[in-house]
Every structure is written in C-alpha cells, then in structure tokens.
Amino acid sequence: MRAAILMVLLVLVWGGNWPIMKMGLTHIQPLWFCTFRLALGLACMVAILVPMGRLRPPPRGDWPVLFSLGLLSMALFMVLTNLALLVVPAGRSAILAYTTPLWVAPGAALFLGERLTRGRLAGLLLGLGGIVVLFNPLSFDWSDREAVTGNLMLLAAALIWAAAILHVRGHRWCAPPLELAPWQMLIGLVPLAAAAAVFEGAPRPDGSFELAWTLGYNGILATAFAFWAAVTVNRLLPALTVSLGFLGVPAFGLVISALVLGEGMSPANLGGLALIIGGVAVVAVAGARERRPPN
C-alpha cells in the first residue's frame, strides 16, 4: 500500500510540475531557476540524511555513475527542458520529455548487448509514430525556429536521460542510491551555477510569491521528495509496474497544463500521447516477459 501511494504521489508531483515550471520561468532566468532548484533539493537531502547518519562520502566505484546522473539526468536534462518550456506548451513538453523509455530499448541493444526483440521493436515504432503525430509534419510551422528548436531540445533531453539510464543499468552499485543522491545533485549544481553566471549574469528574481512557491515545489517536492520516492518504489514494486506507472506523468502533465494554463488538448497531442504511452507500455511488457524465468 505504501509503495502504491508513493507511486500515485510521484505521478501527481512530476506531472503537475510541468505547468508549475512554466509559471516559475516567467519570474527568473531559466538557468538560475535550475540552479536554485538543485540547490534546494541538495539542502533537503542533506537535512534528511544527516539525522539518519547516512551522509557519507561516495565510494570511488560509484563516481562514474554519479557524474552521469549529476551532469546528464539532472543538470543537462533540467537546462534543456527549462529552455524548451519558454517556447513550447507545458503539456506537449511533458509528452516529448517522457519518450525516454523508447530510446532505452535500442540503446540497450547497441551498448549493453541486449536483444532488440520484436516486442521492443514494435513498441519503439509505435512510440515513434506518436512523435510523428505530435509534430504533424504537414501542419507544423517549420519556419518557427524557436518552436523547432524547443521541440528538438525536449527530444534531446529524453535521449540524454536515456543515456544516463543505460549507464545506471550497466553499473554495479557500491553504495545505496539514496546516499548518493546529494552527491549527484552537487555534481550537477556546480557547473550549472557556473553556466548561469556566465550566460545569464547575476540572478534577477522578481521577488514574487509565485516564484517562491514554484521554486519551493521544484526543490522540495519535485527533486528531493521525488528522488527518494522513486528509489523507494523501484525497490518495493516490480519493474513493469513502475514503468507503466510512470506513464501517468505525461498524461497528467497534459491534463493539468490544460486546466491550469489553458493549453488546448488538441487531437495531435492526445493522439501522440496515446501512441507514445502505448509504445512505452509494449516495451515494458516485452522486457518483463523476456526477464521471466522459464517454467
């Protein structure tokens, strides 16, 4: 029951964060928004682990995966999605960013020696069909360079997240992921803060209440709590259940963005979402069947 509750909360927190990020980005520069989010998440993780006596230096064997997670799935993923949110609707952004599982399947075949079976290939093709529907090449305004760049940034963010997942899959952990969380946040935070200072100058928050609560939501809930909850559900629930459960994130992101920001739920968005969710589900089910021991 505890794991199921956490799974639902994760879907709500991460799905609801897409319109919240778009709101927060109207009050401060995008790189500084990412920086403050990671800094707040890091502070929360330290506050949680210190009383538990679990804030320890990471083992040398975990450093490579810490850099992958900190630089790729945290810093670079956040930067690309935040920049894209400046020009792409939040609901559409959630759908494209959560195409990540589609890229893991062919990546695992290329780099980890896993077989790209018919089931996984079918799921990949279904998901790619969803991306084509989302872009709708006949009606997409290819002359709008900002929109094209923003959409490509979201797909790049999904690919980068997939690369980090592949590294995690092939890594032999020396310490529990929860104890490594603050270190990967720190690794992502340092270059992120430096990039923000170089490209955006000093932070220019407008001091609004909306900025304060959107940053609080991102740092405390969408980063610190969500990471702990994700680690917990991955330990307590079967991989297939977790994979399918996370499909609720882009679906809820699309719905809540329509309600909060007034974004239209166009047929292209709904059709693309349905095909991508179907593709990810097929990949997850195929993977679970392949891992099932023979009778």
Image: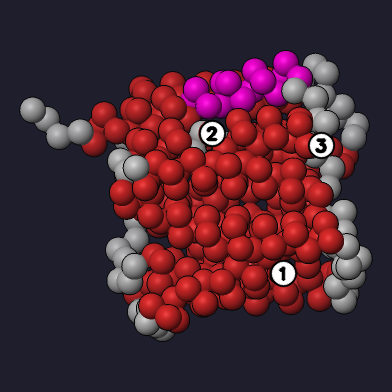
Reply above or below: 18 against 44: above
Q: Which residue is mark 2?
A: 248
Query: Which one is closest to the eye, mark 1 or mark 3?
Result: 3
In the rendering, at what x and y percent does residue 239 appear? 34, 41
Reply above or below: 28 against 59: above
Q: For label 1, count other residues whose C-alpha is less than 10 Å away and answer few (under 14), some (14-19) or many (20+).
A: some
Q: For label 3, count other residues whose C-alpha is less than 10 Å away and answer few (under 14), some (14-19) or many (20+).
A: some
SS type, badge 1: helix
Boundaries of the magenta span: 266-279
Q: Main structural element of the magenta stretch: helix, strand or loop?
A: helix
Q: Is residue 275 magenta?
A: yes
Q: Amino acid at mark 3?
A: Leu
Q: For label 2, count other residues whose C-alpha is less than 10 Å away and answer few (under 14), some (14-19) or many (20+).
A: some
| Image quadrant assignment for residue 214 | bottom right
SS type, badge 2: helix
- The residue closer to the viewer here, 158 or 277, is 277
Q: Amino acid at mark 1?
A: Phe
In the rendering, at what x and y percent does residue 283 appear? 41, 30
Q: Which residue is mark 3?
A: 261
| Image quadrant assignment for residue 191 | bottom right
Q: Is residue 127 left or right of residue 197?
A: left
Q: Is residue 56 left or right of residue 196?
A: left
- The residue closer to the viewer here, 45 or 273, is 45
SS type, badge 3: helix
In the rendering, at what x and y percent does residue 117 appear? 34, 27
Instruction: Give the mark nearest the N terminus, 2 or 3.
Output: 2
In the rendering, at what x and y percent does residue 60 appear? 37, 80
Q: Which residue is mark 1?
A: 36
